[in-house]
Image: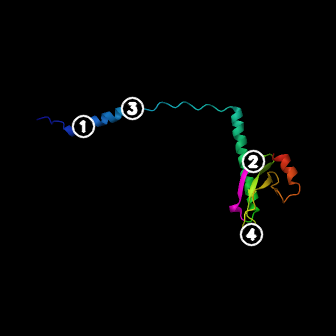
């Protein structure tokens, strides 16, 4: 019985597989260094930021619920200053035109909304809680 000769194509495929496998093993990415652990101060700051964000989102929802066209309202520079969320509101009036930026405050405890020019003691509240 005569032994079969290995074909050129078989040797070429085998050679290619060895080269690809060797390349893959040698080009392994170096391990990434572990991320530094956060300090307690950083963890507290992250928690405070998450709390502030939650209050701002809830206050903006309350604010929008009292508007004629809540989807078109533009709210900017909102920030949490316990127990208020303060910011600026540009909303449409009854004629469909924007009124321009007006300061607003939402009490996060009671849900009360205060808007400049609609609240008598607004300036003193704003100066006390938002500045």
Q: Single out the mark in the foreground, 3 or 4.
A: 4
Q: CA distance from mark 3 to mark 4?
A: 70 Å
* Residue named by callout 3: 25
Q: Is residue 61 magenta?
A: no
Q: Single out the mark in the foreground, 4 or 2.
A: 4
Q: CA distance from mark 3 to mark 2?
A: 52 Å
> In the structure shown, which secondary structural element does the residue marked by tag 2 occupy?
strand
Q: Single out the mark in the foreground, 3 or 2.
A: 2
Please name the residue shown 69% across and 39% down the image: 46
Residue 11 position, x and y percent, is 23, 36
Residue 3 position, x and y percent, is 14, 34
Please name the residue shown 86% across and 58% down the image: 119
* Residue named by callout 1: 12
Residue 62 position, x and y percent, is 75, 57
Foreground residue, 78 or 23? Answer: 78
Against 80, residue 28 (above or below) is: above
Q: CA distance from mark 1 to mark 2?
A: 67 Å
> In the structure shown, which secondary structural element does the residue marked by tag 3 occupy?
helix
Q: Single out the mark in the foreground, 1 or 2.
A: 2
* Residue named by callout 4: 95
Say which quarter of the image contains residue 45.
Answer: top right
Mark closer to the chain start, 3 or 4: 3
Q: Which residues are magenta?
A: 69-79
Q: Single out the mark in the foreground, 1 or 4.
A: 4
Against 58, residue 3 (above or below) is: above
Q: Residues within 10 Å of mark 2 (few under 14, many from 20)?
A: some
Q: Is residue 35 left or right of residue 17?
A: right
Mark closer to the chain start, 3 or 1: 1
> In the structure shown, which secondary structural element does the residue marked by tag 4 occupy?
loop
> In the structure shown, which secondary structural element does the residue marked by tag 1 occupy?
helix
* Residue named by callout 2: 79
């Amino acid at each position: 019985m005569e032994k079969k000769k290995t074909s050129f194509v078989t040797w070429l495929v085998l050679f290619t597989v060895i080269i690809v496998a060797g390349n893959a093993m040698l080009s392994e990415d170096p391990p990434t260094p572990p991320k530094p652990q956060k300090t307690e101060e950083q963890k507290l700051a992250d928690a405070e930021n998450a709390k502030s964000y939650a209050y701002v989102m809830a206050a903006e929802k309350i604010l929008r619920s009292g508007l004629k066209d809540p989807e078109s309202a533009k709210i900017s520079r909102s920030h949490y200053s316990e127990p208020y969320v303060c910011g600026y509101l540009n909303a449409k009036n009854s004629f469909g035109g924007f009124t321009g930026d007006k300061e607003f405050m939402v009490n996060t405890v009671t849900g009360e909304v205060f808007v400049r020019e609609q609240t008598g003691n607004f300036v003193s509240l704003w100066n006390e809680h938002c500045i």
